[in-house]
């Protein structure tokens, strides 16, 4: 489930990218009622998106899911094209109820 409480189904994990850019390419996901094809980026902390400056890098405009072990940020994840990226939280540093509106 995403931080915004959308159900996630991994239809196809895609392929691991050992070069530059997002960690997985051509993943097929269902988030909520929408099917998506795109990249998946993985970080230990949600703040990794901004500390690695992905928000300004067009190579990350295909990311459709940000997977994080810990949610330590307080802002939405945005790509360079201004689209918001859903986050899949693996572990929370605070109760999930405190992270949701």
Image (cartoon, grey):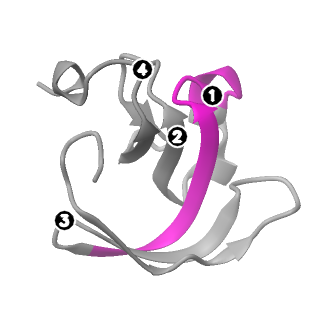
Mark 3 or mark 4: which is in front? 4
Q: Which residue is mark 2?
A: 68
Q: How many angstroms separate mark 2 from mark 4 (CA)?
A: 12 Å
Magenta segment boundaries in residue numbering: 35-53
Q: How many angstroms separate mark 3 from mark 4 (CA)?
A: 24 Å
Would you place residue 82 above or below residue 11 in this image? above
Label 1 crowding class (10 Å Cα cut-off): few <14, some 14-19, many 20+? some
Residue at horizontal 36 percent and vertical 16 percent from the top: 74
Mark 2 or mark 4: which is in front? 4
Q: Which residue is mark 4?
A: 93
Where the C terminus falls, by quadrant? top left
Q: How many angstroms separate mark 3 from mark 1 (CA)?
A: 25 Å
Q: Which residue is mark 1?
A: 48
x and y percent of residue 97 in the render? 16, 26
Q: Residue furthest left?
A: 101
Q: Residue furthest bottom?
A: 11
Query: Relative to residue 61, is residue 78 drawn left or right?
Result: left
Q: Quadrant of residue 51?
A: top right
Q: Is residue 77 magenta?
A: no
Would you place residue 44 above or below residue 37 in this image? above
Q: Which is more toward the observer, 60 or 3? A: 3
- The mark that comes first in sequence, 3 or 2, is 3
Query: Relative to residue 23, is residue 85 drawn left or right?
Result: left
Mark 1 or mark 2: which is in front? 2
- The mark that comes first in sequence, 3 or 1, is 3
């Amino acid at each position: 489930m995403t931080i915004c409480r959308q159900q996630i189904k991994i239809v196809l994990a895609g392929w691991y990218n050992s070069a530059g850019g997002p960690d997985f390419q051509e993943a097929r996901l269902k988030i909520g009622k929408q099917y998506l094809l795109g990249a998946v980026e993985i970080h230990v902390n949600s703040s990794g998106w901004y500390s690695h400056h992905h928000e300004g890098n067009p190579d990350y405009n295909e990311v459709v899911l940000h997977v994080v072990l810990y949610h330590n940020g307080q802002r939405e994840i945005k790509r360079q094209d201004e689209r918001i990226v859903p986050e899949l939280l693996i572990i929370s540093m605070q109760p999930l109820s405190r992270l949701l509106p």
